[in-house]
Amino acid sequence: MLYDDFLKKIKQCPFCLPQERIIGKKLSFLTYALAPYHKDHLLVTSKRHAESFLDLGKKERDEMLDLVNLAVRILHSFGYKDCSILGRDGNNAGKSIKHFHFHVIPKVLLGDIDNYRKERKILSQKDIDKTIKKIRAVIKK
């Protein structure tokens, strides 16, 4: 399924629904991107629905930044030397989900990501399971 078709079908914020969360903290979590720009694309968001970075409390921001740090370390352990960290704030910032989150994406330049939108596909369950297993293996080390 293409990501744009998925967006037309959803009726609720996908980050607010129960989902497989790779690392869950008290106020935030790290997870995989359901419609990734790259196969190892990770996301970090708050558990509480917050549409703007400015809506987040200090403890939420601190936890999220700790998880962004972990996400970068995970991607480096996969062998990536470069990654982009992106947080879109505001209604016209190009975000498709109105729940503030950070993208941590290896090997993709930020200026390039908007060109991929129409081509993005939702991961299969097999790909999701493979991604989670790979990340958990690194975290256990």
Image (cartoon, rainbow, N blue to C red):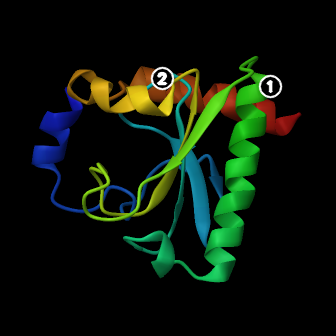
Q: Is mark 2 on a helix, strand or loop?
A: loop
- The residue wearing badge 1 is 77
Q: Residue furthest front?
A: 111
Q: How many labels does the image show?
A: 2
Residue occupying image coordinates x 36% and y 27%:
123
Quarter holding the C terminus is top right
The answer, for residue 25, to whether it is visible in the render is no
Residue occupying image coordinates x 74% and y 34%:
74
Q: Bin the neighbour count of mark 1 within 10 Å (Cα to Cα): few under 14, some 14-19, many 20 and up.
A: few
Q: Bin the neighbour count of mark 2 within 10 Å (Cα to Cα): few under 14, some 14-19, many 20 and up.
A: some
- Percent position of residue 50, x then y: 41, 74
Residue occupying image coordinates x 49% and y 70%:
53
Relative height, residue 35 to residue 43 (above, below): above
Q: Is mark 1 on a helix, strand or loop?
A: helix
Label annotation for residue 49: none
89 lies left or right of 22: left
